Structure formats: structure tokens, C-alpha cells
Image (spheres, rainbow, N blue to C red):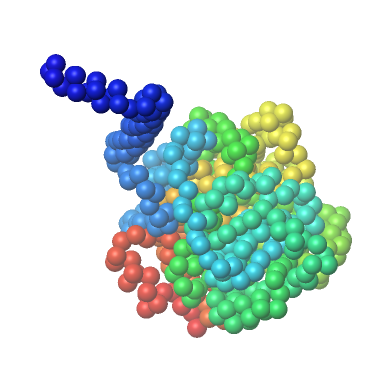
Amino acid sequence: MEVRSEALSLRCDKLPTSVLPKTRLQLWFIRVCSSILLWTCFVHLVQVSRFTYSHRKEGSSPITPPIMHRQLLPPSETAPLHLQLLPISETASIPRQLPTPTESAAIPRRLPPPRIYKSNGYLKVSCNGGLNQMRAGICDMVTVARLLNLTLVVPELDKTSFWADPSNFGDIFNVKHFINSLRDEVQIIRRMPKRLSRKTAYKPLVMPPVSWSSEKYYLEKILPLLSRYKVIHFIKTDTRLANNELPINLQMLRCRVNFEALKFTPQIEALGHKLVQILQQRGSFVALHLRYEMDMLAFSGCTQGCTEEEAEELKRMRYAYPWWKEKEIVSAERRSLGLCPLTPEEAALVLQALGFQKDTYIYIASGEIYGSKRRLAALKDVFPRIVKKEMLLDPKDLQQFQNHSSQMAALDFMVSVASDIFIPTYDGNMAKLVEGHRRYFGFKKTILLDRKRLVELLDLHQNRTLSWKEFVIAVRLAHEKSVGQPAHRRVIVDKPKEEDYFYANPQECLCIRTDCIGLLSPVNSSVIQ
């Protein structure tokens, strides 16, 4: 040991004195860098192990699976309708609940990887109609943008319709979630690039696409136009895609936008969940979409139960709006065809016939009823536990939503989806979109009223041709198989307006089992030639 020490000392003595501090400094630097690197790797390994453990504990994969399919449940044996309805708590099936805002925030969300593609241009869209008509249109436009490899600009909402709602997309829907949740399908931007925003820089093609179009129309008619125009601006979005005969991947994307990407803003979701909790604390409840509102009556020409002055007021309104094409309408004829919403008085009789009891909580999911308290009197006499959002919430809670009909409609939409039973008195856009959501969330009970048959029965009962007992039996028989159970969409060749709406029954998105391929094949489809 002494010999080796002496040798080392001799070697060091031979080195220049300036080298020694430099060598020691390099050694110290290497040791510090190595320590930092090792600690960084250690911290990352700990985080990864915790993340993996939490997902194993929850029984799920750390990678988010594709969100689209829902199991198509076999229909249960049909029971008499009154047994299905009463009591609600024993019959209402809610296999999947909507997450609360707290639960949603607690769920770890991983963004899907962005889809890389060469964009063929930009798609601007101006939606038309009310909230749910615009919602369906947005789903279709995302799908069209994906089909044509376009960059979609966040849609513009309708501000010129009857409701004159000034809300922008971001006032109703969560823009960030909308963009991020679809990034693996479509590139979505908040606004046009500045270089294209100048009016002198480009001339967009402004047009409404053809209604009920297939992918062939967009590929053969619209796509070639992009070689001449950098931007296409669709000024109509309602029903611009066919209900049927679209590729399965496009149908699945429509569902994904509707059920996953279009989330309401945190403010709307929080207040909507508050409404639902208030109602659920009182027990089971029914959401009645009583579409007896001024705009619907004016548009449809339905004046059943109105005074002469009210009928004239509705007619004047119909003529005041140029986009309502039908002007001269015979109310009685329209009603006999089942094309009118039920009046509050008719709704009261139908609910009684279906077996609902006087103590049933009924949430009125609608705006201002035409005729106000006078027209609701008969319904409230039979069902005194009728409530509306204005009765359940503090006026301060609703203050921010005043004069914003679409935001108010969003609250009714959330309550209707979460209700134990949903009953629309007219098959408008909200009724259809809620029906589709309730199917998606486990085929929750939705009573789809046969208004044409009900009008016949109501008139027979009111002129005393049918006794109350006969009326009850007839009403229940007419609706035994109309409670939102699994079913095929009805296809009517060359009559898309009369066939079942895709968003009311998106059957392609409700099944995960392999045997559903045969179930949903064209051979088993309900097609009317």
C-alpha cells in the first residue's frame, strides 16, 4: 500500500498544477449531472407506477378505449302499460346515470392523439333552428368535415330565428372539450386564419347543402368545388345527412359528437344537475315536454282550445316569418292527422289514462305555455305536483340565462334525459334528441304518444261515445310497445321526412355484441317501399 501511494504521488507530481483543479471540476460536474438524471428517472417511474395502479384498481385500462358502442338490450316481455308505469320507482330502469360535475372532474381524461391529414380546405357552418335542431346539424357537419378531410371552424349559432337568442357556441357548449375530444377525427379551429379572414383575400362559396344527402353527394358534388374555393360556408345545417345507408364509421362519428363531444358549459351543467338533484330528492318524476308554445302553434297552425283572438294572433305571427312556408292551414285537418301538439287539457286526460296518479311529480320541460295559467289549470287540477325550473330554482340562479332561450332549453334537456319517464306531446327536435339520449343511456322509458290515434280516442270520449273505462283500455293498448324499447329505425324509401330520425334511434351506436351485425343487417331492417 505504501509503494502504490508513493507511485501515485510521483505521478501526480509530474502533472501540471493547472490540470488538477480542472480534472476535479469535471468529475464533480459529471457526478451532479448523473444524480439529477437518476432522480428525474426515479420520479417518473413513481408517477407511472401510481397511474398504472390506479387504473388496475378501477378495473380499467390506462388507455382510453374507443367510446361508441352500447349494448343493444333484448326487449323484455311486454306487460300491461299501467303495470309498467306504476309505481315509477319499481319500473324505471336507469342502468347508467349522467355523471355529476364533480364526478366528471374526477375522471382522468387523456386526449386522443391528433389525426394528421392534409386538409382540403375550410368548412364554415351557420346553424339554423332551435337548440336541438342546431345540435343535430353540428353532428352532421363534423361528419361531413371528416368525410371530406376539411378543417372545421367552430359553428355559428342561429341568432335570427323566432327565439332571437344571441348566444354563441361557447355560451352553450364547452368549446375546448369539443375541439380536443374530436382531434383524432377532425381538426377544429375557433376562427378562420387571419390570412383568409380578409374579405379581399378569398371568396368563400356560400351555399346550403342538399337535405338528406348521402356521402356520395358530398364526395361527388362538394369535394370537387374545393379545388376552386379555399372555404365553403354552409348556411343550413338541419337534416343535411341521410338517416340511413351511410357507412358505419360515419354513423358512429355522428353518435360520438352527439353523446360525447357536445358537452354543455360548466355553468349550464352545474345548474342542470342541481335541478335534477332537487327533483330526485322528492322521489321519482316524469318530464313532460309540453310543446304547447306560441312558436309551435303559429308554425303548425294548430289552434285547438284557443280563442278566436288567439287564433288570429297566431296566424299573424305565421305570416310575419317568411321562412315558415305554409301560411293557410286548417287546424282541424292538421290535428286529425296527428300533426298538432297535445293541448294541456288533452295531456291531462292521456296521463290519467296511462295510469299516472295524482301525487306524481311532473316537470314541465318547455318554455312559456301559450295561454299561461289559464291553459295549465286543467292539468294542475289533476296533477297538483307540477313544477317548472322557475319554481325550483332561485331567480338569481336563472338570471344569467334570461333572454337566452337555447340556454334555458339546455336545462330542460338535461332534466328530460335524467327523468324516470319522459313523455313528449309533440315529436319535434327536442323530443327526438332526448329520446336518442335515453336509448343511449340504457333504453330509459320514453312514452312515444300516437297523437293520431289519441285524437280519435279523445274526441270519442269527449262526445261520450267512449266511456272512461273504454278510453283507458284503448289508450294503454295503443302505447304498449311505444316506451322507447330497442327497435329498428323505420326506413321509408324516398321519404326521409316520414321515416324514423337517426338521432331518435341511433341503432348503429347501441350495440357491441357480434350477433348485432346480423340484427342490424339490411335483411332485418324495417323498410317500407
Of 19 and 486, nearer the camera is: 19
The residue located at (43%, 57%) in the rendering is 68
Q: Position of residue 223 (x, y in %)?
A: 62, 77
Tell me if residue 328 can be seen: yes
Q: Position of residue 293 (x, y in %)?
A: 73, 52
Up-down: is 443 above or below 216? Answer: above
Q: Position of residue 26 (x, y in %)?
A: 38, 30
Image-based side of 119 in relation to 82, left or right: right
- If the image is split into quadrants, where does the N terminus sit? top left
**Count of marks overlaid on the render:** 0
Q: Position of residue 500 (x, y in %)?
A: 53, 68
Of 408 and 188, nearer the camera is: 188
Of 7 and 95, nearer the camera is: 7
The residue located at (38%, 70%) in the rendering is 520
Tell me if residue 444 can be seen: no
The residue located at (49%, 38%) in the rendering is 104
The quadrant where residue 440 appears = bottom left
Up-down: is 415 above or below 180? Answer: above
The residue located at (56%, 42%) in the rendering is 415
Image-based side of 489 in relation to 403, left or right: left
Up-down: is 131 above or below 335? Answer: above
Of 179 and 80, nearer the camera is: 179
The quadrant where residue 378 appears = top right
